[in-house]
Amino acid sequence: MTTCPICGQRDIGKIGADQYYCGDCCVEFMVRNQDLKIFNVEVDGTLTLYDNIMPGTVNLEVQKG
């Protein structure tokens, strides 16, 4: 199970290999090994690096299986 690292919702979609989308907070995120990258989805569909992460507040739960 994967949860959104920003809002903690579990209702996220998988859009590619190790790529996910959260419709609640409109972010995409990638999880590769222990590396996490979060992107804002802009109105025109482009992705910009999410820069509003406070240290220690990222909620990430990924289980393979």
Image (cartoon, rainbow, N blue to C red):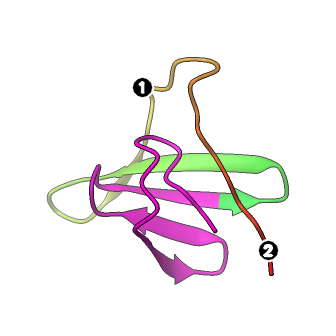
Q: Position of residue 23 (x, y in %)?
A: 28, 63
Residue 64 is marked as 2
61 in relation to 32, above or below: above
Where is residue 8? Give x, y as percent.
46, 46
Relative to 6, does residue 52 appear above or below in the rendering?
Answer: above
Identify the residue position indicated by label 1 in the image. Answer: 52
Residue plotted at (71% across, 60% down): 62
**Which residue is rendered at x = 16% and y = 62% of the image?**
44
Measured in 3D between alpha carbons, the distance from the residue under mark 1 to the one under mark 2, in whole angstroms, is 27 Å
Q: Viewer-proximal residue, 65 or 33?
A: 65
Which residue occupies 64% across, 20% down? 56
- Mark nearer the viewer, 1 or 2: 2
Query: From this viewpoint, which residue is outermost toward the left?
Result: 43
Question: Left or right of 15: which side holds 33?
Answer: right
User: Residue 27: horizontal and vertical position, in percent?
Assistant: 37, 53
The residue under the point 50% across, 26% down is 53
Residue 21 position by quadrant: bottom left
Task: Depth check: give the residue in front, 2 or 44.
Answer: 2
Pick whichever, 30 or 64, lies toward us: 64
Q: Earlier in the sequence, mark 1 or mark 2?
A: 1
* Amino acid type indicated by mark 1: Asn
Mark 2 packing: few (<14 Cα in 10 Å), some, or many (20+)?
few
Amino acid type shown at disc 2 = Lys
The local crowd at label 1, few if under 14, some if 14 to 19, many if 20 or more residues have their Cα within 10 Å, is few
